[in-house]
Amino acid sequence: MRKSFDGLSALVRDVIREDPFSGHLFVFCNRKADRVKILWWDRCGFALWYKRIEEGMFHFPERGAESYEMGAADLSLILEGIELTGARRQKRYKRMGAHVVT
């Protein structure tokens, strides 16, 4: 957790093989899972968000994986201390396809 803007953006580019300027949030967690850094490009510069919890740990679902995608809702729940392994999603509306009017 010693890396800052340049080191984390290099990890995104070289290890994860993603574009750090894409506008996505890139989340980094330490081994004890009690600290998180989030790197984000906001069109004019990098922003870095850092959170340390005093008790417990963050519960990321794919612990040990080099990288994976998650939605904003899942990230928000994890940062609030909610473990997703027992959570259930309710059925939601899913649009079948875009209707194009010509």
Image (cartoon, rainbow, N blue to C red):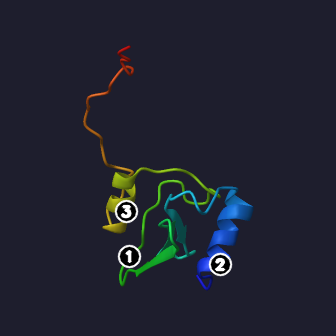
Residue type for callout 3: Ile
The image position of residue 37, as x and y in percent, is 50, 75
The image position of residue 24, as x and y in percent, is 50, 58
Choose top left, top right, bottom left or bottom right for residue 100: top left
Q: Residue furthest top?
A: 102
Of residue 70 and residue 4, the one placed in the foreground of this image is 4
Residue type for callout 2: Asp
Disc 1 designates what residue? 56
Disc 2 designates what residue? 6
What is the count of numbered marks?
3
Q: Residue at x 30, y 42 (%)?
A: 88
Q: Residue at x 32, y 27 (%)?
A: 94
Nearest to the eye among marks 1 and 3: give it: 3
Q: Earlier in the sequence, mark 3 or mark 2?
A: 2
Of residue 90 and residue 96, the one placed in the foreground of this image is 96
Quadrant containing the C terminus in the rendered view: top left
Disc 3 designates what residue? 78
Of residue 1 and residue 14, the one placed in the foreground of this image is 14
Q: Which mark is residue 16?
A: none
Residue type for callout 1: Gly
